[in-house]
Image: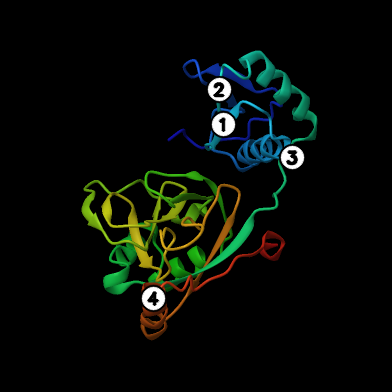
Amino acid sequence: MPPSGPENTSTGPRFLTAGDTALVVEFGTVVDRAINRRVTSLGRALRDARVAGIVDLVPTFRSLMVHFDPTVIRRAEIEARVDALLPDLSDEAGSGRLWRVPTLYGGEYGPDLEDVAERTGLSPEKVVEIHSGGTYECYMMGFMPGLGYLGVLPDELALPRRTEPRVRVPGGSVAIATNLTNIYTKESPGGWHLLGRTPIELFDLRRDEPILLNAGDSVQFYEIDETTYRDMRARADAGDPVIEPQDAGAAS
């Protein structure tokens, strides 16, 4: 993961070769909200343009990988398309969806909450207040289906990853590391600090759209009690998505 730092204000991206069927459009070298918004803005613009020969677009923190069919379109043509779109790209919040994610903090569901509180000099209640008080943009999709890297975490909660990763992290775990937060979509190993757990399924093959989050969406967490968690979990197990997206403008 690239380090976070001051905003790179350069408007001219670098074009990097990624084999003979992909091109990387890199807007900066740090994790930065404005840079990431330009990445997602370019992705939306290229999708809307429906350029023949472009087969997939993969946004990251600071770049967009463009997969293309070289028998249909040349790299130079893609660069020209991107150059033409640059003046209209935005580093303002886009038109992504807002998801309000119910979370049961602490206890067996958030076994690192007490440790995070101790290491940050805050009370567990204050950690929950700060974490649930933010609006986090989905910068990119992560290491498992449906997992989004969400930022930026308030400075008070910024911690390095655990020195000893867990072999098993339960699906739905809400976690923090560095200046990011995320939700483990399925059980997996992991080294992030676990603050709580959500009953919703971010990745469910029973749905028409299995993945809830997309790059450019926003997330707000809100605290629930165990009774509510169990009720929502039962609904999720039955195939109910439990939450619906809102217009991203509701986050402001």
- Alpha carbons under labels 4 and 3: distance apart: 40 Å
- Alpha carbons under labels 1 and 4: distance apart: 35 Å
Q: Residues within 10 Å of mark 1 (few under 14, many from 20)?
A: some
Residue at 50% of width from left, 70% of height from top? 129
Which callout, 2 or 3, points at the residue further toward the start of the chain? 2
| SS for callout 1 | strand
Disc ID at residue 90: 3
Asked if labels 1 and 2 touch by Cβ distance under 8 angstroms, the answer is yes
- Frontmost residue, 133 versus 251: 251
Q: Residues within 10 Å of mark 3 (few under 14, many from 20)?
A: some
Asked if labels 2 and 4 touch by Cβ distance under 8 angstroms, the answer is no
Point out the frontmost of discs 2 and 3: 2
| SS for callout 4 | loop
Q: Amino acid at mark 2?
A: Asp
Q: Amino acid at mark 3?
A: Ser
| SS for callout 3 | loop
Residue at 62% of width from left, 36% of height from top? 39
Which x, y percent locates residue 197? 37, 68
Disc ID at residue 69: 2
Q: Is residue 62 visible?
A: no
Residue at 23% of width from left, 49% of height from top? 165
Disc ID at residue 238: 4
Which callout, 2 or 1, points at the residue further toward the start of the chain? 1
Point out the frontmost of discs 4 and 3: 4
Locate residue 156 relative to residue 192 in the image: left or right: right
Locate residue 231 relative to residue 219 in the image: left or right: left
- Frontmost residue, 43 versus 89: 43
